[in-house]
Image: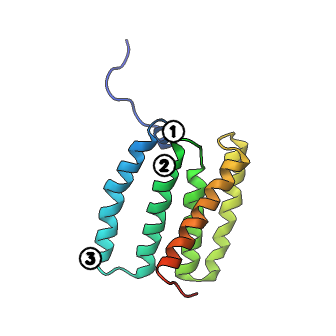
Amino acid sequence: MGRRGAKLLVDPTIFLKQHPRDVIILGALFGLPCLLILVFTKAPSLLLYTLLALLATSLLVAAIYTFYRVSYHLAAVTTLVIMAALTWGRVFLVLSAAIPLVSWAKYRLHEHSPLQIVAGIALAVAVIVIILYLIDFNF
């Protein structure tokens, strides 16, 4: 006897692989209201920039994913590590150890090629540099 109805989503990355355009819609649908809440509640600016960088990185990865696989996990980890160091100080650069660890795991699990891993990291760095340039961030 087969089970009918909606399938249980066990691995969210499967959804990204099968529906990259839907991820863009979901990111905008849920990410933009969160940004507005941070703006209207006058949240600390670096918290707002962190969410903006993560949302922009996620949407860009989903857009690129329609024609080339980029490591979303590495893009997200890189974004969060860099923004944590900018927000709370250089002591949080110790979190940067997560980047090679996640890279190694994704490679060993045959999830991504080295180029896809580097592309995810580079994409995150590029988004952060652009955002920091646009807001005229001073280190």
The answer to which of marks 2 and 1 sits earlier in the sequence is 1
Image quadrant where residue 121 sits: bottom right
Q: Please name the amino acid that badge 3 sits on.
A: Phe
Q: Which mark is residue 62?
A: 2
Q: How far separated are the C-alphas under marks 3 and 2?
A: 27 Å
Find residue 1 and report its horizontal and vertical position in percent.
37, 11
The answer to which of marks 3 and 1 sits earlier in the sequence is 1
Q: Please name the amino acid that badge 2 sits on.
A: Ala
Q: Nearer the viewer, mark 2 or mark 1?
A: 2
Image quadrant where residue 111 sits: top right
Find residue 101 and report its horizontal and vertical position in percent.
70, 57
Q: Secondary structure at mark 3?
A: helix
Residue at x 33%, y 73% (from the top left corner): 38
Q: Would residue 48 appear left or right of 114 to someone viewing this image? A: left
Q: Are marks 3 and 1 in contact (CB under 8 Å)?
A: no
Find residue 133 and report its horizontal and vertical position in percent.
53, 78
- Per the image, the residue denoted by label 3 is 40
